[in-house]
Image (spheres, rainbow, N blue to C red):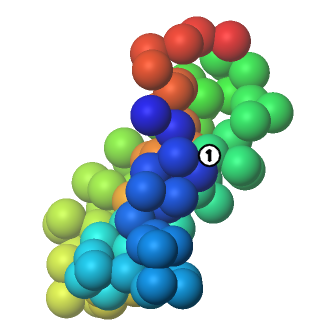
Amino acid sequence: MNARERLTLMIRRDRGNMTVWSQPEVNDALDAHRAQNLSDGLTKEERQFLTFALNLAADVMASRSNEFTDEDEAALATFRHMAAPENGDAR
């Protein structure tokens, strides 16, 4: 299931647009959808390089954790979604 399909399932339509999902779950789904859209044009090599850079960033963030916020962690997670090929596809 892609990110758009997951978001579509999260919204109830039988009584208007409403959701029964928690805000963090909806935010995660929106982040995944945004990352999927951003990553559609990435090649296999670009994904590999992005993964390498994100691993370096994660190491720095872990070693200097008091300098980074939850928003920084969320940004890293969004970029990790971008770097991950959907369903294991390699472009």
- The N terminus, quarter of image: top left
Q: Is residue 44 left or right of residue 27?
A: right
State the residue in front, 34 or 11: 11
Residue at disc 1, secondary structure: helix
Where 7 falls versus 81 (above or below)?
below
**Residue 60 coordinates in the image, percent (x, y):** 31, 62
Residue lying farthest to the right in this orientation:
41
Dot 1 corresponds to which residue? 36
Residue 66 visible (yes or no): yes
| Kind of residue indicated by mark 1 | Gln
The number of discs equals: 1
In the image, is residue 52 above or below residue 44? below
Left or right: 82 in relation to 78: right
Q: Residue at x 28, y 80 (%)?
A: 20
Residue 55, quarter of picture = top left
Q: Is residue 52 above or below residue 68?
A: above
What residue sits 45% from the left and 20% below the top? 87
Q: Nearer the viewer, residue 67 or 18?
A: 18
* Residue 72 seen in the figure: no
Name the quarter where the C terminus is drawn: top right
Using the image as rendered, state which of residue 91 and residue 30 is in the foreground: 30
